[in-house]
Amino acid sequence: MPPASTGASTITLDAAVPSSSATSAPTVQDRLTPGGPGYRRMSFALFSAGVATFALLYSTQALLPSVSASFGATAGQASWTVSAATGALALCVLPLSALSERFGRRQMMTASLAVAVVIGLLVPFAPSLGWLIALRAVQGAALAGLPASAMAYLAEEVRPKALVAAIGLFVAGNSIGGMSGRILAGWVAQLWGWRVALGAIGLLAVACAVTFHLLIPRARHFSPASLNPKALARTVTGHLSNPLLRRLYAIGALFMTVFGGVYTVIGYRLVEEPFSLPQGVVGSIFLVYLVGTVSSAAAGRLVARLGRRGALYLAVSTTAAGLLLSLADQLVAVLAGLVLITAGFFAGHAVASSSVSRTATSGRAQASALYQSAYYLGSSAGGTLGAVAFHAGGWAGTVGMGVLAVLGVLTITLFGTRAARSERLRAGAPQPLHN
């Protein structure tokens, strides 16, 4: 099975990264592996960081109808409280990942989470929509140091064969954070208002940040690099010149466009006719994130059975089926559609992001940062475009936008499959059963 999922060019990740802190350089055998010492602590620490990241990043998403009512804003205007955070994260993830190459993944993740938590405790006191959007942008920028550093940390500290599963657990933490933050926000907002709800999410993030700091193992395979803008530019150019990585970045962006659009708008749809659900019940809809926890954690098994491209095809078809099912005006059908969309998205994201980490043998933080930039730009675009499409054509407009993005993922994956097959034929290699 090749190490990447959507293209022909691959780079094998089979050597240990030299350590700058140990007397003798650690080997691949020294890396963390399931059942081995430190793996459980590492998994729970990064799971907690994932919970905090998504709980903070999307803290206003389930509250958008309340935010709109409070400030007299349209869905499109209120959606910027989500899009500003994800957009700022997308812009800042690359420079902060460069700092992690110099100062360490663990240090960057700790600092990033600490700053984001402090901003999270200030957000409830925003006096206007403009201030709320500004604070959310700063919070997104602070969170930018965490995702790419986490992916690079895992690529360096975990054995290659266990990498998909380890990243799947981190992504599972994202889904738990997204779910718990929205459910908590929905019920607290129904009882005491959206400001108190944002404060409750901030306190949840504090607990997660403390857990992360206490449990995360020190990096044994990290080798610090000097801050060199020219070298950074060469590394970024090298990654962007790799057609396989470009396809993975586009896949992450398009998957997140669907997900960001659907979950930004779904609250508006459910508080309107024919559903007319209260805020607390709308927040509880995000229990479907549990499906994402399962599908992302199972990504490694999917890849083992179907190959990386096969797993992506399954994720695409599942997401598309969910979008179409959600068009029905029955609540059960809408919930079933959300389940399928969530399962497909998290599985696709786990496969694509782990493929990026495994493909890059140098500049891993930058490779992951570029993926995260594309991913969160997709989220920002999806949230705004989804709200605009909803305003123009209702839920059908949002679904139409999502279907176009899913077709984009399908086209890219088909192109990658064809390119990989052509390269194997040129090399005279036998055709694998799956890849």
Image (tube, grey):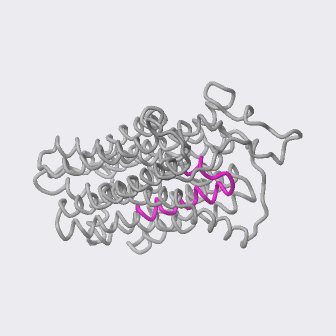
- For the point 68% across and 41% down, the residue is 14
Answer above or below: position of 34 versus 195. Answer: above
Q: Residue 419 placed where, x, y %?
A: 46, 54
Residue closest to the eye, 239 or 224? 239
369 magenta-colored: yes
164 vs 379, left or right, is right
Residue nearer the viewer, 131 or 7: 7
Which span is picked out in magenta? Answer: 356-379
Residue 141 spot, x, y in % from top left: 55, 65
Left/right of residue 78 with respect to residue 42 in the rendered view: left
The furthest residue to the bottom? 130
Query: Looking at the picture, how far across and down is residue 362, in whole percent?
Result: 69, 55
* Front position in the image: 102 or 162: 162
Query: Front-most of 80 and 434?
Result: 434
Does residue 193 show up?
Answer: no
Q: Quadrant of residue 242?
A: bottom right
Verify whether residue 7 appears in magenta: no
Q: Main secondary structure of the magenta part?
A: helix
